[in-house]
Amino acid sequence: MRAMNRNLLLNTIRSQGPLSRTQLTELSGLSVGAVSQIVNDLIESRWVTEAGESDFTGGRRQVLLRLNPTAGYVVGLKLMEDRAVCAVTDLEATVLNYLERPLPTSHGPEAVAETLSHTVIHALYEADITRDKVLGVGVGLAGVINSAAGIVHYSPFFHWQNVPLAGLLADQLLLPVYLENDVNTLTITEQLFGPGHDVANFAVLTIGRGIGLGVVINHQLYRGHKGGVGEVGHITLLPDGPPCDCGKRGCLEAIASDPAILRDMRAALAEGVASTLDTGAALEDIVQAAAQGDPLARDLLARSGHYLGMGLAIVVNLFCPSLIIVSGEGVTAGAHRLDPMLESLREHTFNGLLDGVETLIKPTDDQAWARGAAGLVVGKIFESPLIQTVETA
Ligand SMILES: [Zn+2]
């Protein structure tokens, strides 16, 4: 009970602070005595600091309490196909150090875990943070992830099935390790520190190498059975369409992802379609060519956007969020991709469901993904009484 009350107060200070003791008593519903005692404990153990005084409003000035962002530190790892990116952050997800490491080409789970472990140790060393101050390591990767069990059920990049990655890494680092689908880590971080704060129902769509989805329903990340939520990239839109990495045909990802745009570009050039592009062009070249009026470049981006909008309309029809955050590397393709996406979203959403829905475009770089994985740990710390057992020096 005491641990729960302590967690309640800490969470209230974290999410709504800075707050006075009086405000904290009102918000928590706990007694003045209980709040006073727990707050004293939290200050003594450095989880909470006093941060100035409230504005004078006729009554007595009150000392304000806020979370001490450096009461502990967390590490986030995001696994890409060929490399891992790593961020060390404080409890407000401020990045203190960031680095990248190539992953072993064999992709064997043990070898990958060893590389990740070395990466974490190096990142902490560079940030001058000792391991006893680290509250946990969050790992995000694409695929179906059983977060509670720390198991990668299925990873399309590494061709893993049922790999206990959290355990492998925890054995090496001797730290708590939390595993989650990468889009879910981003979603949790938007909920804790971003525009998803205090939004009951929102969705995060990521566009890039793959197409992913994170969903928050009634303030909770929705994971579904086995963590297999959000495979919007593998909704079939064209049954006879191009083959997908998943083995099926015509998935949204096979039509509208960044690699799909490049594949379609090469096919069009091979057919002799006139363009300033050449077969070695990257997505940024296509974006540049579109800006200069190249019709093929514009068609490619518009086609991708059109199908992304159809996928997003399915998300809105299913979950009816009040906020949609469109994120990922592919967002940098800009208006020639995103305007057709928004148009197609309006066209394909059920009547009225889009009214009042806010759509935010938020480019995500590698560091943002790593920060997202770190946010996963912050979320874990503040959701459980685990904090009771963690002592900071
Ligand atoms: Zn697929």
Image: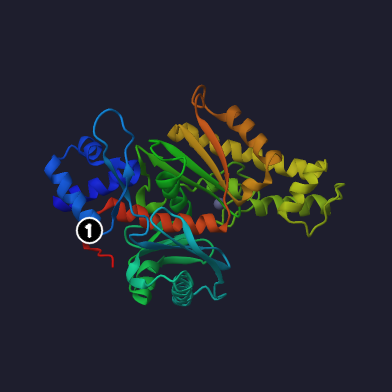
Q: Residue at x 40, y 41 (%)?
A: 216
Disc 1 residue lies near ligand 1 with CB under 8 A: no
Q: Position of residue 84 (x, y in %)?
A: 53, 67
Q: Residue at x 34, y 54 (%)?
A: 68
Q: On screen, 297 above or below 44?
A: above
Name the side, left or right, on which 286 lies relative to 234.
Answer: right
Q: In which quadrant of the rendered view does residue 139 lie?
A: bottom left
Name the side, left or right, on which 330 lies relative to 217.
Answer: right
Q: Position of residue 120 (x, y in %)?
A: 45, 71
Q: Amino acid at mark 1?
A: Glu
Q: On screen, 79 above or below 10?
A: below
Image quarter hosting the C terminus: bottom left
Under tag 1, what secondary structure?
Answer: helix
Q: In which quadrant of the rendered view does residue 90 lie?
A: bottom left
Q: Position of residue 229 (x, y in %)?
A: 43, 48
Name the side, left or right, on which 49 lies relative to 213.
Answer: left
In this rendered view, identify the residue nearer to me: 139 or 252.
139
Q: How many marks on residues? A: 1
Q: Position of residue 244 (x, y in %)?
A: 60, 54
Q: On screen, 250 above or below 133?
A: above
Residue for badge 1 = 44
Q: Is residue 282 shown to the viewer in this render?
A: yes
